[in-house]
Amino acid sequence: MDYFGKKVDLLLLHQTPYSQVLELQRRIFHDVVEAKANDTLILCEHPPVFTLGRVTEEAHILFTDEVLANIGAEKFEIERGGDVTFHGPGQLVGYPILNLSHFKEDLGWYLRSLEEVIIKTIATYDLTAFRIAGRTGVWIGESGNERKICAIGVKASRWCTMHGFAFNVNTDLKYFDHIIPCGISDRGVVNLSELLEEQPTMTEVKNRLASCFEEVFGAKLIITKELKISTAV
């Protein structure tokens, strides 16, 4: 089946509190489900925050509320699949809110497609990233020493999606010491910037990722607006 020719709104945010983007996601998701809004891709960064998916195990959370306060991070229990993960400045977070009826009604295909977007984006830097069977997300490194560069966790209802991926570009990986990311204790995490001689800008990575998203999903991204929302609490 040919998926080309689809249009997806692209909403670019600067560093934005997680709570604000979660509210925005839920509003757009409701409207996409009701066919009142276009398919949308949100790209942003967040201040430090830990998010707990539906299958998060208590043993994977290594922080206390006191530690959260000391490190200046928040936490949210949310409706996506997957375990606990971290978002912070220098990490490109993407929230595709798509009606899969416009693409392919297959959640496995959708997850593999999100992985493919990241794999192709990394390939534009002459690096090879890959999947590991049974572990959703994108990995890079030598066999036995793979490190996770992108986490993926989604929700789907009535074939509409929300939540998405977290791509480590140049984030502070020390925050991951406070969790067992995605419940995986035998592998570490890595930034794209660690693997390159010159540090990429977030704008550059966004542009490359947007192009790869268009290729993988056979869609045309239409920039609807670019917002800068205050991070003040």
Image (cartoon, grey):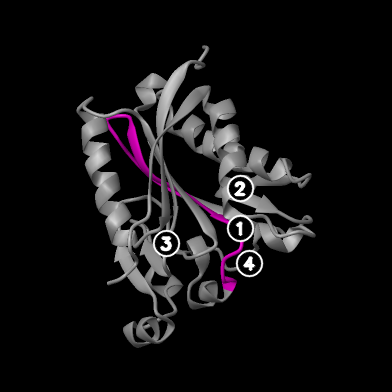
Label 2 CA crowd tier, 10 Å (few <14, some 14–19, many 20+): some
| Residue indicated by mark 2 | 205
**Lower sequence index among marks 1 and 3:** 3
Element assignment for label 3: loop
Element assignment for label 2: helix
Name the side, left or right, on which 49 lies relative to 195.
left
| Residue indicated by mark 1 | 169
| Residue indicated by mark 4 | 186
Q: Which amino acid does the dot numbered 3 rest on?
A: His
Q: How many marks?
A: 4
| Residue at x-position 36% and y-position 57% | 53
**Lower sequence index among marks 4 and 2:** 4
Is residue 85 visible in the rendered image? The answer is yes
Element assignment for label 4: loop
* Circles 1 and 2: CB atoms closer than 8 Å: yes
Rendered position, 167 above or below 32: below
Q: Which residues are magenta?
A: 153-173
Label 3 CA crowd tier, 10 Å (few <14, some 14–19, many 20+): many
Spatial separation of the CA atoms under disc 2 and disc 3: 16 Å
* Circles 4 and 2: CB atoms closer than 8 Å: no
| Residue indicated by mark 3 | 46
Rendered position, 92 above or below 124: below
Spatial separation of the CA atoms under disc 1 and disc 2: 8 Å
